[in-house]
Structures are given as structure tokens and as C-alpha cells.
Image (spheres, rainbow, N blue to C red):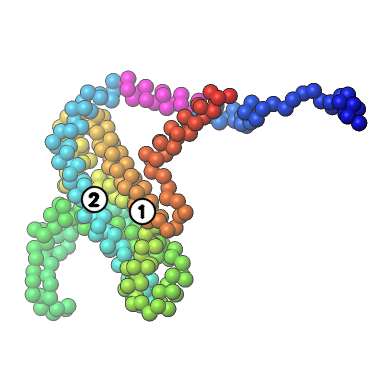
Amino acid sequence: MSESLGSAVPLSTTEPRPAAAQRVLPLRHPGRWIASVIVLVVVAQIVHGLATNPFFQWDRFQYWFLRPTILDGLLITLEVTLYSAVLGLLGGILLALARLSRSPVLRAVSWVYIWLFRSVPLIVVLLFLYNFSALYKTLSLGVPFGPAFLTFDESRLATDMVVAVVGLSLNEAAYAAEVVRGGILSVDQGQHEAASALGLPKGYQFRKIVFPQALRSITPNYVNQLIGLIKGTSLVFYVSLLDLFGSVQSMGSTYPGDIVPLLLVATVWYLILTSVVSVVQFYVERYYSRGALRSLPPTPLQKVRTGLRDLRARVRKEAAI
């Protein structure tokens, strides 16, 4: 028995390869590589054209970028954006609550306001407010249809800054109202029912339960509105307020040979402002996603660290093979 087993010929003389020597080849995607190469070539051509075309006058761009006139206009842009964003959001919250109210009067007035200001172009609103003194010389406070207690001179009250902020705020409130209303409606109805079952007051329910959950939906949409507001401030130039774009236009009229570098200065500053807002949006969304996601989305720095760690692990694996 032992001899027959000893003299038996093995079925296969080929030994299996060690597990470390076995590799799984990924699926090839030639179309993806071709598209990537084409995109890189186009991007390289655009960058090369921007850097070498003398028409852009990058030396003049560098001269104008931090000039006091440009920085003063940038400061006005930031002020108008800040005031309009805060007032517009507060007005939007009130309009959204009015549209969700059980009162038919509040619902109708809110709907008409939103319909009107979403239909009329912003430049028309600004020009109308700028010429408002032609319609009403004075403004007064008192008994409706009765005597007035306080009277204001509209031409002194409505400065260029006030006209710009009021016009942008009125327009922004109409869009913010729909953003806020959509966020409130996105909250699960069970949350409202649970809060009502606990006997919590309506105001407390909104502040502590409904609105914090609605912010997850409101934040990304309103930040898009805020980015549009930053760019929309360029229209206040038409009501004689020299913001960033107004300063560029004014300097372009004085120095017509520098129109292109001045426009590039405005473009870069607007890119910087919108990029900062986008970064703030990411961290605000990340903050309000706590409790809704199993793990928070990684920050850009964490993504870079993870990518470097994966790259080192891949290199070590290749070297071991």
C-alpha cells in the first residue's frame, strides 16, 4: 500500500503561484485617457494665450490690482453685499412664513410680492428707487389717512448707499423666501407632529426643531443666491455708487488704454469673493450635516492627506511585487 502510493505519479507538476505574485489588472479606459489628454491640451493653450498675449497687459493689471481706488470700490461692494444679504434673508424668512401661514391675506400679499420682484429686473428696481423722489417729495409717519407726526425729506434720506441696499434687499428677499420655504417644506412632517405632541409652542418648534433641520437644505441654495448677489452689486454703478465695478468703469473712462487690464482686475476680485463664499458654504454644510450622515464629508486638507497616503501605499505595494 505504501509502495503504490509512493510510486504514484502526481497529476500536475505545476505549482501554484504565490499570492503576492498574482495581480489583478484593472479594466482599461482608453476613451477616458484620450478625453483627459484633449482637455489638458485645451487648458494649456488657454493658459499660454493668457500669459503671452500682450493685449491683456499684465503689467498694468499688477499696477491696478491693489490701487486705493479699486480697494475703496471693493469695500463698498462688501458693505452693500453684507447689508443686502442680511436684510434679504430676514425679509425672505418673513415672506416664507407668510406664505405658509393660514391667513389668506398674508399668503396673498407674500405671493404677490414674490411674483412682482422676481418678474421685474433688478436694474429697473434700482433705477425706480433712484428716481423715487420724483414721485414722492416727502415721506411721513402718522395716522393712516390722517395727520402726519413725522415728515422726512426723501432726497436727503435716500442716499446712494441706501438706494443700493434697499433695492438689492427687496429683490433678494423675494428669492430668499422661496429658498427658505423650500427648506421648511423639506423637513419631515413627523418632526412637526412630534413637536406638537410634546405641546411645544409654535415659535419654539420653528426656532429649535424645524429651522435647524431646514438649514441643511437652505444653506447651499441661499449661498448660490449670495454669489449672485455679489455679482449683482455691479449694477449699483447705475445709481451713482462707485463699487468695485463702478471704480473699474470710472478708471476705464479716464484711462481708455487700460480697459482690458481693469476688467481683468474686476474679474479676479469677483472670483476671489465668490471662492471665499464657496469655502464658507462647504464648512457650514459640513456643520449642519452632523447627525444626518454617518461620517462627515472630508475637508480639502483631509482629501489631500488621504490621497498622499493612498499613493504611498500603492508605491510600496508595487515595490514589494
Q: Main secondary structure of the magenta part?
A: helix
In the depicted structure, whether residue 52 falls above or below residue 159: above
Q: Going 31% across and 53% down the picture, which residue do you hit?
A: 121
Which residue position is annotated with label 2?
A: 81
- The 10 Å Cα crowd at callout 1, few under 14, some 14 to 19, many 20 or more, is few
Q: Report how many numbered discs are placed on residues in the image.
A: 2
Magenta run includes residue 283: no
Inspect this view and state whether residue 274 appears. Answer: no
Residue 295 shown left or right of residue 256 in the figure: right
Q: Residue 72 appears at what percent x and percent y?
A: 15, 41
Look at 15% across and 52% down and name the residue there: 160
Q: Is residue 49 magenta?
A: yes
In this view, the residue farthest toward the front is 2
Highlighted range, magenta: 37-53
Q: Where is residue 74 drawn, in percent x and y?
A: 19, 42
Please say whether residue 286 is visible from this viewpoint: yes
Disc 1 marks which residue? 287
Front in this rendered view, residue 141 or 103? 103
**In percent of the image, x 29 and y 59: which residue is there?**
89
- At 37% from the left and 59% from the top, the residue drawn is 215
- Of callouts 1 and 2, the N-terminal one: 2
Quadrant of image for the N terminus:
top right
